[in-house]
Amino acid sequence: MRAFLAIPIDPRTTQQLNALVAQLKQTDWGERIVWFPPQNYHLTLHFLGGKVEAERVRAVADSMQNWFAESMSYFEAEVRKIEAFPSALRAHTLIAKVETTLMLQYLVREIEEQIKPLGFTASQQAFRPHISLGRIPLELNPISIPSAFKHLDNIWLNVDRITLYQSELTDGSPIYTPLAERLLETYD
């Protein structure tokens, strides 16, 4: 089973991202991007793997409610800009880059500590928080993002839950099925 842990994108932020995508679709390259459906928007915290046994994924799901010895409270992270990923010259995905805050880094480290006893290792790649918006065809490289999208203001992601997803790859967009969820502490 292919599975990952992620932050689902709240409705307000999804709406703001959709407005940006609508503008990007108007660029000279916009119609050649394979745009992901808004229900697929997420911020990956830890990719568990592409071929994980169902029992191990179930063990992660079962353990989630016991995560965080001290309550982890919700927070916000700022969506900073639209960019090509992993780089402008060798891009395969158009993303909304999220600021790498200490809270996000702490959350990733805590999750890795929680899943370590279940046989999962820490990611070997640097954490680069982002929300994937669409797939860039190889022939569009290098891609030039209009300057209006290189600095975004007032788009905040609510980090109030962690979701365990199963991912099924298809010829089009992947299908993400939520398997379990861990709410973060809120103070209303």
Image: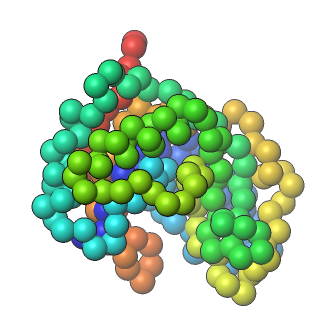
Question: In this rendering, would 38 be left or right of 135?
Answer: left
Q: Position of residue 84 (x, y in %)?
A: 70, 65
Is 84 rendered above or below residue 113?
below
Residue at the image position 66 percent from the left and 66 percent from the top: 86
Quarter of the image for residue 79 reads top right
Considering every residue shown, the one lying at the far top of the view is: 188
Question: In this rendering, would 171 be left or right of 20?
Answer: left
Q: Position of residue 48 (x, y in %)?
A: 34, 60
Quarter of the image for residue 152 reads top right
- Locate the C terminus and report the quarter of the image it occupies: top left
Is 50 rendered above or below residue 183?
below
Quarter of the image for residue 151 reads top right
Residue at the image position 78 percent from the left and 52 percent from the top: 149
Is 173 rendered above or below residue 117?
below
Here the colouring is rainbow
Q: Position of residue 97 (x, y in %)?
A: 65, 50
Q: Position of residue 49 (x, y in %)?
A: 34, 67
Residue at the image position 28 percent from the left and 73 percent from the top: 51
Tell me, yes or no, if residue 18 can be seen here: no
Considering every residue shown, the one lying at the far bottom of the view is: 139
Residue at the image position 67 percent from the left and 84 percent from the top: 138
**Count of numbered circles on the image:** 0
Q: Nearer the viewer, residue 66 or 168?
A: 66
Tell me, yes or no, if residue 107 can be seen here: yes
- Locate the N terminus and report the quarter of the image it occupies: bottom left
Considering every residue shown, the one lying at the far right of the view is: 147
